[in-house]
Image (tube, helix red, strand yellow):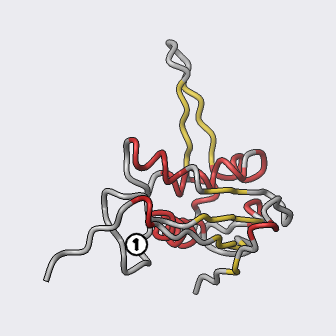
Amino acid sequence: MKTFMQRKEDVDRKWYIIDANGLPLGRMATKAAHILRGKHKPTFTPHIDGGDFIIIVNADKVKLTGNKINNKMYYNHSGYPGGLRERNAKAMIEKYPVEMVERAIKGMLPKGRLGRQMYKKLFVYAGADHKHQAQMPSELSID
């Protein structure tokens, strides 16, 4: 019996929508990264982007457990001396909820060219509206 290796031409992609309202950030991010990678499919091949598309709505209503809202820090550096900018999770969820969710998911994807290709299949929206109704996404529940 030969080992099955999927080809990129044979990938069958679906669209899923996740409502992040009240969901813990980490649990939602792991589920989304799992689907973006394609690990939920029996045809999973590590070196092929065989994942599905993910739409996340209500990113501004995502939940953080414990005291992470005050203690969790996000860092950016401009590359210049003294260019470090740090914000806590409370500031991120108020001003940049989309970036907060995207960072959580992107950190769980592979690094390099394949991970960047998978990341392009992620669409995050702060509110309940999205522009992908034509793709008829199916609802994905996270337990």
Image quarter of the N terminus:
bottom left
Question: Furthest residue to the front?
Answer: 9
Image quarter of the C terminus:
bottom right
Question: Which residue does the image show at 56% across and 53% down from the upper left?
Answer: 71
Mark 1: which amino acid? Lys
Question: Which residue does the image show at 59% across and 35% down from the upper left?
Answer: 86
* Label tally: 1
1 relative to 104 in the view: left or right: left
- Residue 88: x, y in percent? 62, 46
Looking at the image, is 136 positioned above or below residue 92? below
Residue at which label 1 appears: 39
Q: Nearer the viewer, residue 27 or 5?
A: 5
44 relative to 116 in the view: left or right: left
The quarter of the picture where residue 55 lies is bottom right
Secondary structure under badge 1? loop
- Residue 105: x, y in percent? 53, 57
Question: Which residue does the image show at 59% across and 29% down from the upper left?
Answer: 85
Question: Which residue does the image show at 66% across and 75% down from the upper left?
Answer: 23
